[in-house]
């Protein structure tokens, strides 16, 4: 892979005006916080709209070019980082660990695949999480669910769980600090590193959207994605990302139909532009071989050149006897192998992997070459939401991917 100077966001000091706020007739938005003080929220959003974007529009365009190469089968995409970043967890050691782990994984995958690897972090903005229920009950007390540090606190107290618009300001500042460190690390290694997060809290995303001479961009990250819980065809999240020029992604679960996927393509990528749209399948090991083939074959037949990624984490989560949410490395790998088998059968390119991981020696996922056992789970279970691969497990995944790519037949595209 040719080394190039870092293009991690440098702050939007060029031209650009705040993008439009949500129109009065905006479609419904799922998974939004119940902000108790709408006036305070509006004041925070108005302030954020006057600040520099965290990345540059031209950087987003360069990432689109890199993703176009992935869509054509000329590169591989590796996306990884925390399930949910926390404000207190953004230490130099933690950022260095994530950056370094993704770099090591990329080197292994590139050697096996014989292709360049595009490095995309779930970092510098992954502060919000969708939840299966808006409320959480413990010991007879019911409080709002934790929706990520961008919204409220993890501690189970009424004060911490109250949605606070001031957290949007803090999320912006800490994201900027994280980007500064990532820039320095990437420049030292003369490599490219890109940032991404789920575009969930629309007040934050809209406040950091700018109308530039090149078009409208969400300058909170280079790429933003829409999750499985917010990809409603008539919903506000797809409507929002349809209006920005960033490369965007959408997660597809096992109930996604081919018609759903084609409708998303029509809405987000009507011009069939390679690199514009990434589909991240999160099927689960039991469903991927049955649910994914029709989606891939019909989207490919439509002429769309999307990037196909596999998220082997979310569909393989279960609760251990100790009460910890966890994932088993063997199940993760089974979904990855199923993803590759589907693409081998169809003659298409398995574009990459989307994984929740950290460079730290946590004990959140079971298995690996130095196995984490059920008894180990409580020792370093530190995630704010879902379990992550530790550094050793992440490198195990990268070695397995290198072998899968080395033996994958060339794409017929």
Image (cartoon, rainbow, N blue to C red):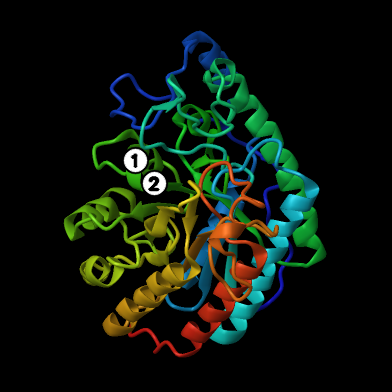
Tag 2 residue: 227
Residue that numbered label 1 is attached to: 230
Categorize mark 1 by other alpha carbons within 10 Å: few (<14), some (14-19), many (20+): many
Give the Cα separation between the discs numbered 1 and 2.
5 Å
Q: Position of residue 173 (x, y in %)?
A: 70, 32
Whether residue 50 can be seen here? no
Measuring 68% from the left and 77% from the top, which residue is drawn there?
A: 2
Indicate the position of residue 326 as horizontal and vertical percent values: 49, 55
Residue drawn 68% across the image and 68% down it = 103
Can see residue 130? yes
Q: Are marks 1 and 2 in contact (CB under 8 Å)?
A: yes
On the image, the x and y values in percent for residue 289 come to: 27, 72
Residue 385 as seen in the image, left or right of residue 284: right
Residue at screen point 61% across, 58% down: 376
**Closest to the observer, 4 or 136:** 136
Badge 1 marks a residue whose secondary structure is: helix
Under tag 2, what secondary structure?
A: loop
């Amino acid at each position: 892979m040719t080394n190039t100077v870092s293009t991690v966001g440098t702050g939007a000091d060029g031209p650009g005006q705040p993008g439009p706020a949500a129109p009065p007739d905006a479609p419904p938005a799922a998974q939004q916080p119940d902000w108790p003080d709408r006036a305070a929220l509006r004041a925070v959003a108005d302030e954020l709209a006057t600040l520099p974007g965290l990345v540059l529009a031209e950087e987003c365009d360069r990432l689109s070019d890199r993703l176009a190469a992935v869509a054509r089968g000329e590169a591989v995409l590796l996306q990884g980082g925390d399930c949910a970043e926390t404000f207190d967890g953004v230490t130099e050691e933690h950022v260095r660990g994530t950056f370094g782990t993704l770099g090591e994984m990329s080197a292994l995958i590139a050697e096996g695949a014989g292709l360049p690897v595009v490095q995309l972090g779930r970092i510098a903005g992954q502060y919000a999480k969708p939840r299966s229920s808006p409320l959480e009950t413990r010991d007879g007390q019911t409080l709002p669910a934790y929706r990520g540090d961008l919204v409220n606190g993890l501690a189970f107290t009424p004060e911490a769980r109250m949605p606070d618009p001031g957290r949007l300001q803090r999320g912006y500042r800490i994201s900027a600090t994280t980007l500064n460190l990532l820039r320095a690390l990437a420049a030292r290694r003369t490599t490219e590193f890109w940032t991404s997060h789920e575009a969930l809290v629309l007040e934050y995303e809209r406040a950091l959207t700018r109308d530039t001479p090149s078009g409208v961009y969400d300058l909170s990250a280079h790429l933003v994605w829409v999750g499985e819980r917010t990809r409603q065809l008539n919903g506000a999240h797809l409507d929002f990302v349809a209006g920005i020029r960033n490369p965007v992604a959408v997660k597809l679960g096992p109930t996604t139909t081919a018609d759903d996927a084609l409708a998303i393509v029509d809405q987000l990528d009507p011009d069939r532009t390679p690199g514009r749209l990434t589909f991240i399948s999160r099927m689960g090991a039991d469903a991927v071989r049955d649910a994914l083939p029709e989606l891939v074959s019909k989207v490919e037949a439509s002429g769309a050149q999307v990037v196909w990624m596999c998220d082997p984490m979310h569909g393989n989560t279960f609760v251990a006897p100790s009460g910890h949410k966890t994932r088993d490395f063997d199940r993760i790998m089974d979904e990855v192998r199923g993803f590759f088998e589907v693409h081998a059968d169809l003659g298409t390119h398995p574009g990459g992997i989307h994984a929740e991981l950290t460079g730290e020696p946590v004990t959140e996922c079971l298995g690996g070459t130095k196995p984490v056992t059920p008894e180990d789970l409580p020792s370093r279970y530190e995630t704010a939401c879902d379990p992550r691969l530790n550094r050793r497990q992440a490198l195990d995944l990268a070695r397995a991917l290198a072998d899968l790519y080395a033996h994958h037949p060339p794409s017929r595209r």
